[in-house]
Amino acid sequence: MAVRQPGGVVFLAIAALLMLPPPPVLAAPASDPEQELRVLHSLVGKLEKQMADVGRAAKSLDKVLTNMEAQFSVLHQNVTTLERHRDDLMDTCAPPADTAGTATTSGPVTTAQREGPRVRDCEELLPYGIRDSGVYTIYVDNQPVRVFCRFVDGSEAWTVIQRRQDGSVNFNRSWADYKEGFGDPGTEYWLGNEIIHQLTTGRGSSAMYKLYIYMEDWEGGYIHIQFDEFYLESEATNYKLRLNLLRGGNTRNAMYSNTGQPFTTYDRDNDAYGANCGKRFGGGWWYYGHACVYANLNGLYRKGGETSDGFGLVWLYWRSPVWYSAKVTEMRIMIRDASIPVRQP
Ligand SMILES: *[C@@H]1O[C@H](CO)[C@@H](O)[C@H](O)[C@H]1NC(C)=O
Ligand SMILES: *[C@@H]1O[C@H](CO)[C@@H](O)[C@H](O)[C@H]1NC(C)=O
Ligand SMILES: [Ca+2]
């Protein structure tokens, strides 16, 4: 807080005192130097006392402000906790899957949400002491958007852009749905191509995002992989995928053919494959010309994991040479640390 500067307050007080018109006794002709000195001394004494008073006042003002700050912080956390409880309740009372599937990003916004911190992604919640993974509201291009925030190790705060976990949400959706986002951040959802585009390019190259992909199998194992450069181009280029700087993980990169590809849905064929890969594989993705999928997290949900020919939530190198469909998937992003050395794919 810029105004809280006790030194500054004291200074102003002294300055004010010094700028008072001089007492008449000083202006009077100097007849008795001793008398004058006594008066001066007493004046200095008064001044000193006033300065001490001002100092004390400044100090207590400072204390009040610090106190208010602390209270505000607690209040803020309480509001956040309340918001989270409300979100949990909303999730609990959510209507059946296919109606729930349409709402997410444009749902009702309560006063509490409006008054919450206008964070631009989940990482900006960290200074507020928030460390619990869950659904929060962020502001993308000044619009409130509900997202799932994944907190890892108490220090990393990822913004989740894609989640699957039980097949409750249909991912074979139109271009418009993929653009706006669909599903429920509390269970399964796609954040929305326009939002992802705004989020990953809206703050210039100083806020470059990395992407982390997580896929869990039906036996409790998982694969994961991270890329240090991730953004979507605008709708003008059909949300072309920019995915580079493979950092690593415990699997090989099955998305090397996807980078630079435009997005395709069953009703908007932008892939170079003869047919429409989105229609064929039942979900929007950055399909590529040769074989549509090496990796696809937006495909048909296959209970049990058994699948073939690239159908399902697949990753080429997972159980190669057989195709396998994940039980849980998550794609999440966070601003990358500019100082982290990167290695090329
Ligand atoms: C915040 O919540 C705690 C309990 O979680 C409560 O004790 C405290 O009084 C609340 N503070 C305010 C300012 O509402
Ligand atoms: C996806 O939806 C479209 C439009 O309803 C349909 O034509 C297509 O067969 C579906 N794809 C799959 C794999 O279910
Ligand atoms: Ca095609």
Image (tube, rainbow, N blue to C red):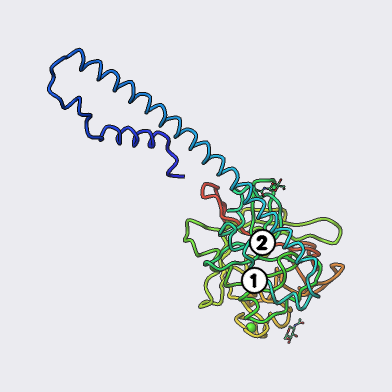
Q: Nearer the viewer, residue 178 or 210?
A: 178
Q: Residue at x 25, y 15 (%)?
A: 38
Three-letter amino acid code of the residue under disc 2 = Val
Q: Nearer the viewer, residue 39 or 231?
A: 39
Quarter location, residue 5: top left
Name the residue furthest top: 34
Q: CA distance from mark 1 to mark 2?
A: 13 Å
Label 2 Cα crowd, 10 Å radius (few <14 / some 14-19 / many 20+): many
Three-letter amino acid code of the residue under disc 1 = Thr
Tell me the SS state at disc 1.
helix
Tell me the SS state at disc 2.
strand
Q: Which numbered marker is on residue 289?
A: none
Q: Which residue is mark 1?
A: 105
Going by the image, does 61 lie left or right of 13? right
Q: Height in image: 299 above or below 244?
A: below
Quarter location, residue 253: bottom right
Going by the image, does 2 lie left or right of 114? left
- Percent position (x, y) of residue 314? 75, 68
Q: Residue at x 26, y 35 (%)?
A: 20
Q: Nearer the viewer, residue 206 or 48?
A: 48
Task: Mark yes or no: residue 321 visible.
Answer: no
Q: Residue at x 73, y 82 (%)?
A: 280
Q: Which residue is mark 2?
A: 160
Disc tally is 2
Q: Height in image: 244 above or below 155?
A: below
- Percent position (x, y) of residue 34? 20, 12
Considering the image in quadrants, where does the C terminus appear?
A: bottom right
Mark 1 and mark 2 in contact? Answer it, CB < 8 Å.
no
Q: Height in image: 30 above or below 232?
A: above
Q: Height in image: 95 above or below 227?
A: below
